[in-house]
Amino acid sequence: MESGNQSMEKKRKDLLMEIFSAGLRAVDPEAAVRSQVSRQGNCLTVGGRAYDLDYFRRVILIGAGKATALMAKALEELLEDYLIEGLILVKPGYAVPLRKTRVIEAGHPIPDQSGLEGTVEIIRRLSAASEKDLVVCAFSGGASALLPAPVPPLNLSQKQLTTQLLLECGAEIGEINSIRKHLSRSKGGGLARAAYPATLISLILSDVVGDRLDVIASGPTVPDDSRFADCIAMVERYGLASRLPGPVWQYLKDGAAGLFPETPKAGDHIFAKVQNIVVGNNRMALLAARDQAEALGFRTLLLTSGLEGEAHQVGRMLVALGKEVGFSGHPVAPPACLLAGGETTVTLRGQGKGSRNQELALAAAIALEGLSRISLLSAGTDGTDGPTDAAGAFVDGATCQRARARGLDPGDFLSRNDSYHFFESLGDLLITGPTRTNVMDIMCLLIE
Amino acid sequence: MESGNQSMEKKRKDLLMEIFSAGLRAVDPEAAVRSQVSRQGNCLTVGGRAYDLDYFRRVILIGAGKATALMAKALEELLEDYLIEGLILVKPGYAVPLRKTRVIEAGHPIPDQSGLEGTVEIIRRLSAASEKDLVVCAFSGGASALLPAPVPPLNLSQKQLTTQLLLECGAEIGEINSIRKHLSRSKGGGLARAAYPATLISLILSDVVGDRLDVIASGPTVPDDSRFADCIAMVERYGLASRLPGPVWQYLKDGAAGLFPETPKAGDHIFAKVQNIVVGNNRMALLAARDQAEALGFRTLLLTSGLEGEAHQVGRMLVALGKEVGFSGHPVAPPACLLAGGETTVTLRGQGKGSRNQELALAAAIALEGLSRISLLSAGTDGTDGPTDAAGAFVDGATCQRARARGLDPGDFLSRNDSYHFFESLGDLLITGPTRTNVMDIMCLLIE
């Protein structure tokens, strides 16, 4: 009986892993680039728009983000000899060997000197590009930290202190990003401005809910709709005028007075030469996972690619959906696979180790206790769930019972945010290593 | 344009209200009773089981709960002259005129002397019932408070203090209920024991997630699986032995020593003469709401009847599902209606007025801002959302904009738990008055 349960458990893990892996394959950065970019002879087609490569004097590649090395690899293969040179910034450990593209490992999530120097070099190369040059960009999650470029005369620590102050006074992320874009030479369309009058193609692997182009990687090639005056109003609303670093406040006031140009806006002529295109996102991963689940014999329901909110609450809600399937066959009858994606958050209450996917899974395990036919996987597509070496975890109705048999109290681990050690003890961590892609998280629920 | 928006908004409210009302009609207590109980001549059929009314010497009716008056009305009409007498306990304002049944309005949610006296009278009548008597019971949400009957020598305030201490030390609701059942003559099968050897039919309108019969109304006619020894262990685990009222602790210890009988267990002979049946629940309301939505031209998805969790988080998650429908047509293409039910909770952070449905709707309004084709209703089927005179609220993508135009900051109202005043100002409260039914809450999301 025990071995029967073990093999059932093993089979569920295998099924969940097959479905998750199919999702990952669909957003492999190389596959994602090739899904939107193709070449025949001198004709490069990007999302249905054609470029005559022979028209251009030089084709260069730049990029930043966790998934960018593999995106660059695909672009090198696609562009072949048309590509003259490239420069990308990646998180340490995320580099791969490239033929023509220089890869700089820069600080993430805290920007460092390598990132600063690399970004300056990117801006230098873009600024040198002529009207007859083509710039191909590759951006993915993590690029904001990898592309630091404070406007002169500001330095990195002044920018970081500003962000810190805004966070502490409760400013919303959209407000903070508006100010960061105004203090940066790269963000908020900054790289598009630097590249003008060259033609620019920006390939984007989305790691944000809703794929907002002005949010992914802080939108280096995308119009920004905020103004210096908005930044001033925001600083004053939060009573920060006297607390901001002096040069930052002075810069914003001078900008509002017209001494510096606003970030480029939608309709600005520079964007006539820019194509931004999302080559991969959470929904693409979910669709591929769905196809795999159907091939395995499950009725499927792709719930949403836009999950947000507190991880343990989302875990409970997913279980509520799974229980309904099991008890009443709504909205689909078993065997069923419910799929969702997005990125939840964890409000820390304890000192434990873990992150959003593992915490979601632990809360789900508690809500599932004793149900024999429901199992769940929650995992980050980048292979790293917060500060852990796991992508996420597996749970089913027997998880809590198995934990108690080892003297582990699931509720206690959850209240201490210690999901990693809980699943480590049970051998139920999902470990993939770095996947070199990043389209947020995937949750898969099987109801047999 | 403004009037166009207003009429659009009016039309959405009408659609949402039509769908919600169809759900309410399906769980109208009279309709619910008649869906499971019918009579032809001397034959009473209850959920497929037949009773020969001529066999019984006396048929009596007892009950407690918010919806019980209308359940009793249907039972009086069904039983006609077979019914000898009845006694039910309802929340003040929930009585209706009955022919043979005495209706006592008793304290809710805080038990009072009327409830105590009424419960004693119910137990007296049940104890007087013989083997050839039939007891028909009607229970619905609220019955726990309406049926107070401390075991002698305990009094009501000692029981209440015990519950309070358990809540404060973080005991789980299941643990608290185990102790309450052991301190009560009515809960945890107490009324079934009192009625034995009479035949007993218990008609139950469920107001709990998963329809657990031992939880609804504290299971007065249902086996209880906890023991005095469990209660002792729990009290000691939370370090409450010296803090409980002395007589309570003494009673539990004496019970564990075998001086008092355990609550009746599954398999106990008394339950051979008991039929418990759920006549209405949240899922029935959702199914009827779904049929109405389909009749109105929407593709529908009944998500779950088991929603739990923090109201504002659930609101955000429902919006995430609605956005996916709008953006990608998953899991159904617009025009679509997503339906969910259950009961969320609110962790109070502010001093405002509101409750779970209004708070859920306000969080949804914030997440929906600017989207033109999504609207949501969240409302309690009993017509009262917490301590307010509203059942819930309506929201759509224009709600926040309309609020700001009146100088109201949605995020501020949410952080103060002041959703009632927010929606009152906008005229977007859903007000039904007491519906005299109670199957938790319904959320309806329309995506056009």
Image (cartoon, coloured by chain):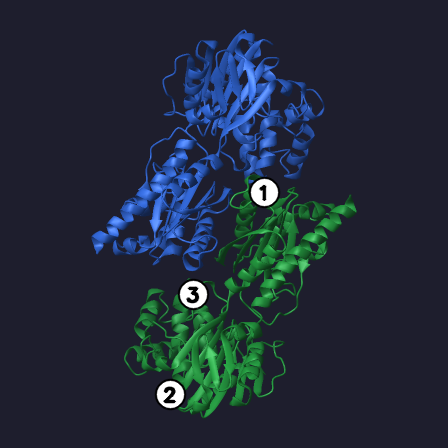
Chain colours: A green, B blue
Q: Are marks 1 and 3 on the same chain?
A: yes
User: Mark 2 belongs to which subunit?
Assistant: A
Mark 1 against mark 3, which lies toward the viewer? 1
Disc 1 versus disc 2: distance between alpha carbons? Answer: 59 Å
Closer to the camera in the image, B118 or B72: B72
To which residue does mark 2 refer? A197
Residue B297: x and y in percent read: 37, 45
To which residue does mark 3 refer? A173
Q: Going by the image, does A281 lie left or right of B262?
A: left
Residue ID at (50%, 62%) = A283
* Label 3, residues with CA under 10 Å away: few <14, some 14-19, many ≥20: few
Farthest residue toward the top?
Answer: B57
Q: Are marks 3 and 2 on the same chain?
A: yes
In the picture, the disc for residue B318 is none
Disc 1 versus disc 3: distance between alpha carbons? Answer: 39 Å
* Quarter of the rendering occupied by the N terminus of chain B: bottom left
Judging from the image, what secondary structure is the residue with disc 2 in? loop
Residue ID at (65%, 31%) = B231
| Residue type pointed to by label 2 | Pro
| Residue type pointed to by label 3 | Ile
* Label 2, residues with CA under 10 Å away: few <14, some 14-19, many ≥20: many
Closer to the camera in the image, A410 or B228: A410
Q: Going by the image, does A307 lie left or right of B376?
A: right
To which residue does mark 1 refer? A326
Judging from the image, what secondary structure is the residue with disc 1 in? helix
Residue A254: x and y in percent read: 31, 80
Q: In the figure, residue B434 lies in which quadrant?
A: top left
The tag earlier along the polypeptide, 3 or 2, is 3
Q: Going by the image, does A412 lie left or right of B448?
A: right
Farthest residue toward the front?
Answer: A40
User: Mark 3 belongs to which subunit?
Assistant: A
